[in-house]
Amino acid sequence: MLTYLSCTGFCSVLADVLQEHVQGKRPVMLIGYSLGALVIWSALKELARRDRAGIVDTVILVAAPIPAADLEMWEEVTAVVARRVVNCWSDDDWVLAVLHRIHSLTADIAGLAPVAHPRVENMDVSKIVNGHQEYKNHMEAILKLVGID
C-alpha cells in the first residue's frame, strides 16, 4: 500500500488553519496537484478525526496519489467537505503510475482512475495532459473543465 504522509507538519498545520478560520468565515476551496493533493487529503482526514465537517466547501484533487478503491476513507473525507469533491485523473500519467507501483501492486489510485464514490465527481483530463509534469502547464484548462473560472 502507498505510504502516506502522516498528518504532521503541513497536514496538521492546514487542518489547524482551517479549523481556526484564519481565512475568515467564507467558503474555502482547496486545490492540490500531486503531493499537494495528498497534503489536502491528509488534512481532510485530520478534520474528520476532529469532527470538523463543513469548514471546506470544495476540494479539487489533481493527480492524487491516493487509493481510489478505499471507499471507507473516501466516505470519511467527503463527509468533511460541504459541497464538491472532484478527482481529476489521467490514465496517461506514467510518473504517478510507476511511483505508485513501487509502493503497491494495485492500480487503483485516484490520479489514474475514477473513484467509485457517489459524492466524488470524476474528471478524466487525459485529453488535456499527457504526463505528470504537464498538469502544472494546463491547470487553467483543468479548472475550466471542472467549472472553476
Image (tube, helix red, strand yellow):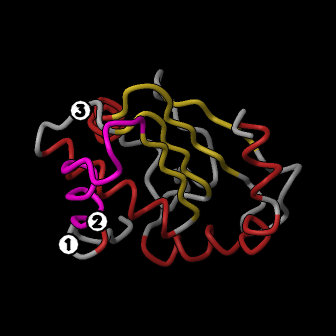
Residue extending furthest left?
50
Find out whether residue 70 is within the magenta segment: no
Judge by depth and name the residue closer to the eye, 48 or 17.
Answer: 17
Mark 1 and mark 3 in contact (Cβ < 8 Å)? Answer: no
Q: Specify the amino acid type for callout 3.
A: Ala
Judge by depth and name the residue closer to the eye, 68 or 54.
Answer: 54
Magenta segment boundaries in residue numbering: 11-27
Task: Please tell me which residue is depicted at 83% across the width and 49% down the height of the picture.
Answer: 141
Q: Which mark is residue 53?
A: 3
* Alpha carbon separation for disc pair 2 and 1: 6 Å
Identify the secondary structure beneath mark 3: loop
Identify the secondary structure beneath mark 1: loop
Task: Please tell me which residue is depicted at 69% across the width and 38% down the height of the picture.
Answer: 148
Q: Which mark is residue 11?
A: 2
Q: Residues within 10 Å of mark 3 (few under 14, many from 20)?
A: some
**Upstream in the sequence, badge 3 or badge 2?**
2
Q: Residues within 10 Å of mark 1 (few under 14, many from 20)?
A: some
Question: Which image quadrant is residue 138 in?
Answer: bottom right
Q: Which mark is residue 8?
A: 1
Looking at the image, residue 70 lies above or below residue 147: below
Question: Which image quadrant is residue 40 in?
Answer: bottom left
